[in-house]
Amino acid sequence: ALQASKTYCNQMVIIRKNCDDCEKQPTIAEKLTDQRKGIKALLLDQRGVVSGVGNWVADEILYRSGIHPDQTFLTTTEANRLVQEMN
């Protein structure tokens, strides 16, 4: 079973390397810029930008980034800082 799993993973890596659309996918920072919705609402939207961010985690990320939760427009620098705090 382990060998089959490794084979499957290797096949998926090859498929992903050959994917033309992979390079066209926007980064998280790009998804956060130029939005009309408040940044906290974007973080809490599990399908919009990133999944797994809850209420208090969103508050903590925004606090550490120095960004107000209701702010609707992020510069590229602010979006990159926000992504860095997520990591």
Image (cartoon, rainbow, N blue to C red):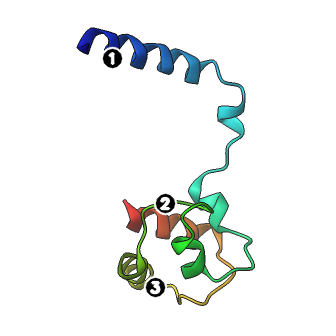
Quarter of the image that includes the C terminus = bottom left
Point out the tag, 1 or 2, that comes first from the N-terminus: 1
Numbered disc 3: secondary structure: loop
Which residue is under mark 2?
A: 51
Please give the name of the residue rendered at 53% of the width and 88% of the height, measured from the top-left corner: 69
Quarter of the image that includes the N terminus = top left
Q: Amino acid at mark 3?
A: Gly
Which residue is under mark 1?
A: 5
Disc 1 versus disc 3: nearer the observer: 1
Which residue is under mark 3?
A: 66
Q: Amino acid at mark 1?
A: Ser
What separation in Å lies between label 1 and label 2 (alpha carbons)? 26 Å
State which quadrant residue 71 falls in. Answer: bottom right
Along the line of sight, the residue nearer the viewer: 41 or 3: 3
Q: Amino acid at mark 2?
A: Ser
Along the line of sight, the residue nearer the viewer: 42 or 86: 42
Point out the tag, 1 or 3, that comes first from the N-terminus: 1
Tell me: residue 44, above or below residue 30. below
- Residue 34 location (% of width, % of height): 74, 71
Please give the name of the residue rendered at 69% of the width and 80% of the height, measured from the top-left corner: 37
Point out the tag, 2 or 3, that comes first from the N-terminus: 2
> Is residue 29 rendered to the left or right of residue 87?
right
